């Protein structure tokens, strides 16, 4: 028959290691948690990013729709910002996180923060003391900030909400500036184009001493028509004289001279209008002046139309930017704790006991495995 089991030397060694390696550390952890660890108060704030977009009349009628988009939502950006060094630095400057979290340093060096630590140490402590929960499906963010007094915890959560609101406002300002930036550039370019076109028309009028060549052209055309009418009358009168008088009649010679003078004047006026070969001495023909003026006027009218369109686009962009506004909506305002619920001593003790037991068990198994291989 097999002999009865009895404790051997190695069994006593395992038992002693269990007491020293498991029981004693657990007791030390429990002693620290219940006698040294300072009470922590939690303040919760929850919010979401809201965007108000009022559709314009054109959009309601199925007209213009927005073609712009973003690769990430404002809530995603805010979630990353809440974990950034920039926020921690701003929060420290606003409420002095180092002083708040270092109050029980002499009593509780583990959970308290050493104020001599670097900004990286402060960010690491931020991750320990501030819990951030993000529901990306609903776009909701909940933040639980802890401190060693209820007022400090509420101060941290309320200041965090203010900093987050400021960041969202900055995003809105950037988006608004992006929305109207290109429209403003187009408007400025159209203004410069219109200014140049109007200056060109003014220079043309000053150089040629003409307000509107079309008016002078009509006057010249009317004068030419009058001369041609007078020429027709003179020709008729000349024909009548030839039929009714002798060829040496002085009136015939006078009529011929009158016809020549009128003809010369008609030719001169026609040259001014560009209706005959050559140009008038000292002046451009009216046809060339009128063509240049029409080109300048067309350029000016096109610049005015471009300016009107650019102005309308700029005002539309401004109105669109005003209609689309972002703001941070808190559905849970910063709370004020009435009792200290942290640190969760029972949970921490259980986790510490589990970890210590796993480490001890692993070490014992490794030692026995090494002995069995000998």
Image (cartoon, rainbow, N blue to C red):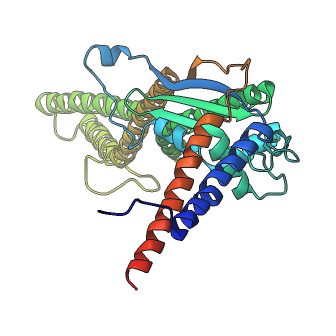
Q: Nearer the viewer, residue 67 or 102?
A: 102
| Residue furthest to the right | 106
Q: Considering the image in quadrants, where does the C terminus appear?
A: bottom left
- Residue pictured at 34% horizontal, 45% vertical: 291
Residue extending furthest toward the front:
1
Q: In which quarter of the view is residue 299 placed?
A: top left
Q: Residue furthest left?
A: 243
Q: In which quarter of the image is the N terminus?
A: bottom left
Residue 30: give x, y in percent of width and height.
Answer: 69, 43
Report whether 333 appears left or right of 56: right
> Camera-side residue: 139 or 127?
127
Give the percent coordinates (x, y) of residue 51. Answer: 47, 24
The residue at the point 27 percent across, 36 percent down is 255
Give how far across and how far down residue 138 sits, in percent. 40, 26
235 horizontally vs 328: left or right = left
User: x%, y% of residue 101?
Assistant: 79, 42
Q: In this view, does 18 lie above or below 247?
A: below
Q: Relative to residue 323, is residue 186 depicted above or below?
A: below
Image check: 82 left or right of 55? Answer: right
Q: Can residue 179 be seen in this view?
A: no
- Residue 121, by quadrant, is bottom right
Return the residue nearer the eye: 254 or 337. Answer: 337
Residue 358 visible in the picture: yes
């Amino acid at each position: 028959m097999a002999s009865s089991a009895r404790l051997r030397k190695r069994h006593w060694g395992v038992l002693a290691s269990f007491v020293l390696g498991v029981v004693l550390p657990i007791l030390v952890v429990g002693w620290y948690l219940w006698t040294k660890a300072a009470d922590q108060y939690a303040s919760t704030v929850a919010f979401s990013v809201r965007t108000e977009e009022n559709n314009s009349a054109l959009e309601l009628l199925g007209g213009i729709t927005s073609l712009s988009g973003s690769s990430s939502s404002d809530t995603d950006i805010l979630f990353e910002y809440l974990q950034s060094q920039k926020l921690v630095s701003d929060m420290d400057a606003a409420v002095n996180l180092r002083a708040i979290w270092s109050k029980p340093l002499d009593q509780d060096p583990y959970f308290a923060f050493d104020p001599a630590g670097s900004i990286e140490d402060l960010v690491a402590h931020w991750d320990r003391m501030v819990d951030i929960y993000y529901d990306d499906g609903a776009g909701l963010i909940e933040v639980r900030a802890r401190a060693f007094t209820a007022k400090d915890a509420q101060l941290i959560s309320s200041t965090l909400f203010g900093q987050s609101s400021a960041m969202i406002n900055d995003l809105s300002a950037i988006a608004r500036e992006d929305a109207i930036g290109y429209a403003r550039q187009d408007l400025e370019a159209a203004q410069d184009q219109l200014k140049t076109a109007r200056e060109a028309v003014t220079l043309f009028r000053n150089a040629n001493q003409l307000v509107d060549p079309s008016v002078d052209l009509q006057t010249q055309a009317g004068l030419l028509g009058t001369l041609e009418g007078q020429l027709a009358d003179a020709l008729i009168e000349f024909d009548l004289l030839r039929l009714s008088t002798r060829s040496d009649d002085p009136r015939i010679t006078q009529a011929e001279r009158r016809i020549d003078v009128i003809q010369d004047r008609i030719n001169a006026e026609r040259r001014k209008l560009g209706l005959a070969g050559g140009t008038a001495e000292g002046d451009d023909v009216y046809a060339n002046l009128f063509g240049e003026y029409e080109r300048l006027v067309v350029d000016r009218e096109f610049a005015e139309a471009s300016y009107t369109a650019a102005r309308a686009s700029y005002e539309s962009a401004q109105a669109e930017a005003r209609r689309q506004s972002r703001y941070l909506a808190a559905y849970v305002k910063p709370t004020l704790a009435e009792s200290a619920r942290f640190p969760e001593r029972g949970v921490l003790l259980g986790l510490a006991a589990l970890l210590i037991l796993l480490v001890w068990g692993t070490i014992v198994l490794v030692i026995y495995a090494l002995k069995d291989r000998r």
